[in-house]
Image (cartoon, rainbow, N blue to C red):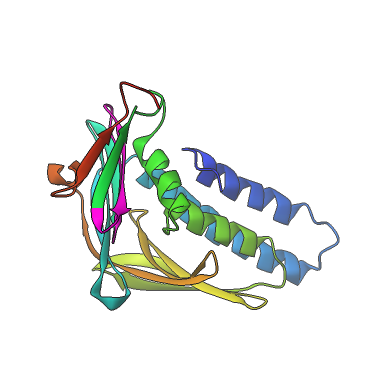
Amino acid sequence: MPAASTTLRTLALSVVTLLTVTGCQALEDAGRAMGRADVVNDLAARMDRALELTYSAEYQLPGGRTASIAQSQDPARSAYEWPGGKVTVTAEATTRCGKDGGRTVCTIEAPPAANSKPSVVVFAAAEREGQVTPPMVMGLLTAAALDSSAVITQSDTTVAGLLATCVDVRQNADHFSACVTGEGALGSFTGQVDGQPVELALSRYQEQVDGAAFDLPPGAGVVDRRSTGS
């Protein structure tokens, strides 16, 4: 799903439109559709606002592994790190790190266009590596909201000490659940990505970021392609 700073809000508004112009629906069905649209719209608005925040979030993965998301606004920069990989976007460079023969190697390339949001670019790159991102979760929710056969259950809880709205979605043979905090951070996700089971849960959230979050992994090899453009 393409990531853009207005994608989440636009997606939600599209859902509302599509679900409210079906004049042939029975009143009860229309009410249920509007409920779905309201949930998607609310979660999309939260995630959209979160793109403008400075925060760091740590996630617990199966097997004791961890992942993290960090973004700041002044200066604008963002990073997503997971076991074996990392993507960082700053005004100076876009850096992608991964394992190569047991060693971490980071490729440094030119930064994105000046009008691009670092967090959006990072999420798009992380998705290509099979990672769960807020835009990816919104895409799944939107598809479910448009599917009249999907069963969507909403609940409220706390994740890492933060209030969050959760949805459990059963769509034919597919099933996933996700939580979004009031701040707009992804609180948890359990489901499948590219046919593989994925699970993560927010373990720590801070409205500040350690500058080290944007550094290269210790001992990583470096390939700098900024000057060659190749």
Examine the rendered structure and indicate whether residue 130 appears above or below residue 77: below
Residue in view at x 34 percent, y 39 percent = 52
Image quadrant in which you'd find residue 169:
bottom right
- The secondary structure that most of the magenta stretch takes on is strand
Task: Look at the image and tell me whether residue 217 can be seen.
Answer: yes
Rendering coords of residue 219 (x, y %): 13, 49
* Residue 39 in which image quadrant: bottom right
| Residue 228 vertical placement versus 204 (above, below) | above
Q: Is residue 205 above or below residue 74?
A: below
For residue 213, side relative to residue 5 (left or right) = left
The answer to whether 209 appears left or right of 28 in the picture is left
Could you tell me which residue is drawn at 37 percent across and 53 percent down?
184
Q: Is residue 168 visible?
A: no
Residue under the point 72% across and 51% down: 18
Q: Is residue 119 magenta?
A: no
Q: What span is in magenta?
A: 83-103
Q: Residue at x 46, y 49 (%)?
A: 45
Q: Position of residue 94 (x, y in %)?
A: 32, 35
Q: Is residue 106 above or below residue 199?
A: above
* Left or right placement of residue 106 versus residue 199 in this view: left
Q: Position of residue 71 (x, y in %)?
A: 27, 43
Q: How many marks?
A: 0
Q: Quadrant of the C terminus?
A: top left
